[in-house]
Image (cartoon, helix red, strand yellow):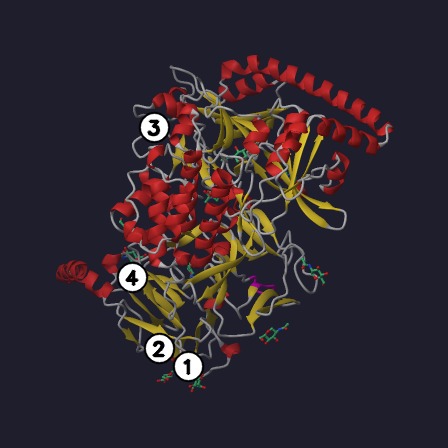
């Protein structure tokens, strides 16, 4: 007995040594498409479907050292596992030499290192079946079936992997449930990209609440998406686009309910998966990019996935967000490893534990504004906010509260906070939530805009005053409108026109050598209200630094982008009009054209040509849309932006410094030609700027040159800096996440610089571009990009030399860049005073378009 033990031990030890070799020897032998009583699958053998498309055997995912039995596409260059047997019972690398996947007593079973069954098909047999004839075959569609070796008829299959899917729903398989046996197909997400064990998200056809409809659930209970009922053609909740690739079939009869899809062209490779992030995705393999293309997701927005960012995580879907998931202030990712693999559902954990009940300083509350409140708030009775806060503070289980007398009164949360989302400032559904933290967090997270417990009453008064003012001004506005409408609209319009033109003499003077007088049409506020449906949310195209942009449909179906300037400036009507006329004179194919303007009381509105393809950032940071811009196109876009910038800086008779150049300000027309937008707006909003030094910094984190962000100095060279960032983003497909970032790796500048110094320029280039990329041009662009972001403005090239360099054939002759700015200026360094000016709260700080009052 003990000698057997020693033998086993020796074998085990030996296996550890030999394992790496075996794992590398790549499942050398294929033993056909069938497992029978004489053949089994081990670390050294696999089975392959007869058409060679699918393979089954042991696999590991990424760096995970556990082994699983799975089925994957054999011919694809990227490991894609469609089915896993032992998701919950992995086999460690040390057992692998002994593990077997075989037929045993009529069942397909998985044996671990000590030859014990850790997974089984659990078939119950009819008495007339001869168990020693049972075999398992991997079919051509990826279905593993257990059957009587004498019968090929699918009705006689004893067991099918398609009936027990993991996270993939394959073409031709059924997805639903059997009304008689209750057996159902559930797609369960992986824990993370390297770990097939079951994650929290499931997709199934619901038996009860949504009888027969597809639903996606969190933790088997919270339903956060459903397909809506079947109309005979489509599901009401699924935007079904008739397509030439596949058809859907939905069956609901006395025996079963299921959903199935079939490709007309069987050579297309596609599937549905329940992704680790809680979205169902339909994927299509693209040979051109050697990768999966996601062409459909449910729910559309990741923040609609329940608990996407896990406990105490916040989701941010806004376009300018640097990352979708973050932890609340005072929290950090629970498992850094998961987060790095883009699986956030494990959530965040406190940095410092709470101090409830003990002696010492009491816990405090950190305020988060504009949040979607977490799930499962408990409603408690409290007559005011102070009481609500103290109710939470006294309860050691309470982790936070929110108070809104009109909406929900006092809500408190116990345990974990799930499903938080950072909403935009103007979202009506946003609430303020107070999250409990240990008092010590408040000294480490000093942040001026944090409103702590003791400040609450002080804040309440100004808010009251503001509310009263708002009320009064609304009243005044209504009164004003009433009066107005009694007049004839046209005459009012005319008077503004005349007034503006009468004092615009100077403007007319300088127009004389133009081909014709450029007259920007005046649009009445009423016509804009009609065109934008009263500036409705649906028509909102985006939010720029100077105000929101709406789509307006004018008479004749003409589409125009309407920019409603925030009423920041104290500029008068005439000054504003002059500025508009000046800007209207700037005409270039790489600038968005100004089509009109409107002034009425406090409203200042500019009308631009509408760009159907939206902005550059919606392409380059999106894997799907990114593919549309191949290298050729991207290079042309870089050149186009440079030409537009050259025109602004040198060629027009006005010298315009853009001050907010970034990918979201580059719009693309139908032919994907770039057009710079928002140029000249800094002038319009701020009036005449005579000095190159301003006490208001307008711009966007991540694109601002250091001398501008810190000292308020702007120049052509600060635009060049922003352009450098834009170039780097275009070639890398990555956002520059701001400059005061601790980790060099997550800062695009640092990353680009490192690759440059290591001579690995091509590693920066977006994966999707590798096929189309011209290496010389890519290196040239990186070189120019880095020249533009040098610390000293004097070192940066001007726009005309950028254009020359872009056109130059000889990349060896380009100057070598110096280390970029901000590499040496990190948080907590010598420049604390400057960094604290631009630092904002830790959750979602980057790419904020703001006007910062500099303390000088
Ligand atoms: C595996 O680990 C190495 C080092 O720990 C890391 O560099 C690599 O990115 C990891 N690969 C994956 C796929 O996680
Ligand atoms: C094999 O599985 C059995 C049953 O689950 C377990 O008791 C045993 O420890 C496993 N063997 C190894 C080497 O893990
Ligand atoms: C087989 O039955 C065992 C015990 O009931 C269960 O734990 C296991 O999950 C079943 N296996 C499958 C594949 O359903
Ligand atoms: C079952 O099948 C095996 C092999 O085909 C055969 O040897 C055996 O006699 C059969 N047993 C019965 C009870 O039919
Ligand atoms: C089952 O089908 C395969 C081909 O699909 C064929 O080669 C084999 O002979 C069939 N076996 C029986 C028992 O019909
Ligand atoms: C799912 O719910 C169960 C019971 O409510 C809980 O114990 C478990 O932690 C939850 N799982 C996740 C991933 O939150
Ligand atoms: C679903 O099909 C109906 C016709 O049966 C059609 O009118 C409707 O527009 C379709 N809905 C969607 C979302 O495609
Ligand atoms: C869907 O397409 C498959 C494959 O072409 C075909 O066999 C099936 O009949 C089609 N079903 C419907 C409902 O059109
Ligand atoms: C606010 O919430 C309601 C109800 O959940 C939703 O219909 C609406 O679209 C939300 N509004 C915004 C701006 O998200
Ligand atoms: C995104 O832009 C909006 C509106 O400009 C702003 O309120 C919000 O704070 C920005 N978010 C981030 C993360 O920069």
Q: Quadrant of residue 606?
A: top right
Q: Secondary structure at mark 2?
A: loop
Crowd rating for badge 4 (residues with CA inside 10 Å; few <14, some 14–19, many 20+) = many
Q: Which residue is mark 4?
A: 112
Q: Position of residue 585 (x, y in %)?
A: 60, 39
In space, the residues marked 2 and 1 are separated at their CA atoms by 8 Å
The residue stretch that appears in magenta: 176-182
User: Quadrant where the N terminus lies?
Assistant: bottom left
In space, the residues marked 2 and 4 are separated at their CA atoms by 19 Å
Q: Secondary structure at mark 3?
A: loop
Q: Is residue 241 magenta?
A: no
Q: Report the residue at 44% width, 18% height from top.
A: 855
Which sits in the foreground, 649 or 526?
A: 649
**Farthest front residue in view:** 513
Q: Is residue 125 visible?
A: yes
In space, the residues marked 3 and 1 are separated at their CA atoms by 69 Å
Numbered label attached to residue 36? 2
Mark 1 close to ligand 5, CB under 8 Å: yes
Task: Say whether marks 2 and 1 touch (CB < 8 Å).
Answer: yes
Q: Report the residue at 76% width, 21% height from top.
A: 475
């Amino acid at each position: 007995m003990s000698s057997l033990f020693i033998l086993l031990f020796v074998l085990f030890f030996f296996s550890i040594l030999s394992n790496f070799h075996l794992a590398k020897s790549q499942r050398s032998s294929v033993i056909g498409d069938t497992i029978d009583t004489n053949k089994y699958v081990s670390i050294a053998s696999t089975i392959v479907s007869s058409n060679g498309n699918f393979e089954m055997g042991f696999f590991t995912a990424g760096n995970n050292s556990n082994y699983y039995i799975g089925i994957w596409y054999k011919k694809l260059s990227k490991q894609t596992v469609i089915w896993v047997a032992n998701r919950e019972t992995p086999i460690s690398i040390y057992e692998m030499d002994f593990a077997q996947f075989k037929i045993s007593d009529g069942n397909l079973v998985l044996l671990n290192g000590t030859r014990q069954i850790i997974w089984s098909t659990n078939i119950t047999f009819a008495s007339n079946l001869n168990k020693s004839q049972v075999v398992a075959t991997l079919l051509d569609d990826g279905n593993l079936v257990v059957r009587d070796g004498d019968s090929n008829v699918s009705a006689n299959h004893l067991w099918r992997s398609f009936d027990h899917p993991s996270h993939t729903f394959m073409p031709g398989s059924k997805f639903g449930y059997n009304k008689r046996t209750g057996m159902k197909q559930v797609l369960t997400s992986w824990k993370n990209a390297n770990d097939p064990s079951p994650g929290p998200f499931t997709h199934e056809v619901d038996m009860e609440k949504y009888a027969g409809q597809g639903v996606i659930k969190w933790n088997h209970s919270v339903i956060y998406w459903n397909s809506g009922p079947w109309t005979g053609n489509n599901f009401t909740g699924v935007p079904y686009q008739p397509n030439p690739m596949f058809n859907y079939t939905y069956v609901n009869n006395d025996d079963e309910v299921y959903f199935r899809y079939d490709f007309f062209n069987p050579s297309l490779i596609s599937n549905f998966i329940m992704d680790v992030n809680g979205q169902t995705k339909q994927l299509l393999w693209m040979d051109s990019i050697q990768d999966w293309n996601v062409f459909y997701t449910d729910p559309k927005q990741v923040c609609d996935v329940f608990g996407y960012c896990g406990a105490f995580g916040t989701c941010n879907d806004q376009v300018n967000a640097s990352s979708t998931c973050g932890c609340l202030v005072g929290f950090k990712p629970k498992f850094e490893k998961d987060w790095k693999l883009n699986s956030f559902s494990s959530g965040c954990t406190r940095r410092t534990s709470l101090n409830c009940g003990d002696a010492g300083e009491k816990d405090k509350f950190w305020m988060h504004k504009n949040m979607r409140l977490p799930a499962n708030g408990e409603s408690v009775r409290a007559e005011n906010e102070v009481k609500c806060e103290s109710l939470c503070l006294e309860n050691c289980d309470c982790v936070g509260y929110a108070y809104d007398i009109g909406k929900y009164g006092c809500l408190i949360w116990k345990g974990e906070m799930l499903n938080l989302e950072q909403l935009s400032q103007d979202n009506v559904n946003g609430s303020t939530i107070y999250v409990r933290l240990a008092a010590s967090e408040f000294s480490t997270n000093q942040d001026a805009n944090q409103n702590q417990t003791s400040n609450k009453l002080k804040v309440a008064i100004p808010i009251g005053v503001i509310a009263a003012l708002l009320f009064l001004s609304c009243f005044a506005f209504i009164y004003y409108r009433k009066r107005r409408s009694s007049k004839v609209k046209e005459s009012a319009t005319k008077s503004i026109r005349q007034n503006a033109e009468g004092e615009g003499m100077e403007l007319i003077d300088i127009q004389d050598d133009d081909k014709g007088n450029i007259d920007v049409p005046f649009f009445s506020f009423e016509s804009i209200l009609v065109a934008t449906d009263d500036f409705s949310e649906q028509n909102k195209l985006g939010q720029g630094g100077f105000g929101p942009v709406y789509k307006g449909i004018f008479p004749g179906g003409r589409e125009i982008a309407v920019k409603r300037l925030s009423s920041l400036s104290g500029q008068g009507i005439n000054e504003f009009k002059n500025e508009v006329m000046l800007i209207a004179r700037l005409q270039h194919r790489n600038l968005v054209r100004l089509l009109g303007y409107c002034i009425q009381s406090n409203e200042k509105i500019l009308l631009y040509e509408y760009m159907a393809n939206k902005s550059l950032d919606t392409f380059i940071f999106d894997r799907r849309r990114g593919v549309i811009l191949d290298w050729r196109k991207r290079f042309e876009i870089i050149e186009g932006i440079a030409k537009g910038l050259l025109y602004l800086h040198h060629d027009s008779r006005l010298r315009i410094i853009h001050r907010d150049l970034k990918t979201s300000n580059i719009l693309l027309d139908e032919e994907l030609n770039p057009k710079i937008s928002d140029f000249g707006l800094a002038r319009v909003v701020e009036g005449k700027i005579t000095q190159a030094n301003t006490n208001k910094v307008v711009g966007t984190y991540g694109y601002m040159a250091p001398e501008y962000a810190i000292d308020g100095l702007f120049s052509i060279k600060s635009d060049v800096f922003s352009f450098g960032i834009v170039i780097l983003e275009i070639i890398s497909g990555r956002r520059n996440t701001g400059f005061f970032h601790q980790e060099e790796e997550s800062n695009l500048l640092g990353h680009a610089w490192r690759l440059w110094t290591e001579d690995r320029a091509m590693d920066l280039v977006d994966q999707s571009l590798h096929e189309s990329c011209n290496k010389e041009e890519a290196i040239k662009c990186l070189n120019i990009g880095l020249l533009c972001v040098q610390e000293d403005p004097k070192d940066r090239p001007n726009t005309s030399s950028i254009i020359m360099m872009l056109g130059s054939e000889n990349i060896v002759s380009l100057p070598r860049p110096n280390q970029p700015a901000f590499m040496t200026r990190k948080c907590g360094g010598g420049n604390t005073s400057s960094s604290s000016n631009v630092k904002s709260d830790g959750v979602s700080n980057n790419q904020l378009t703001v006007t910062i009052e500099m303390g000088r």
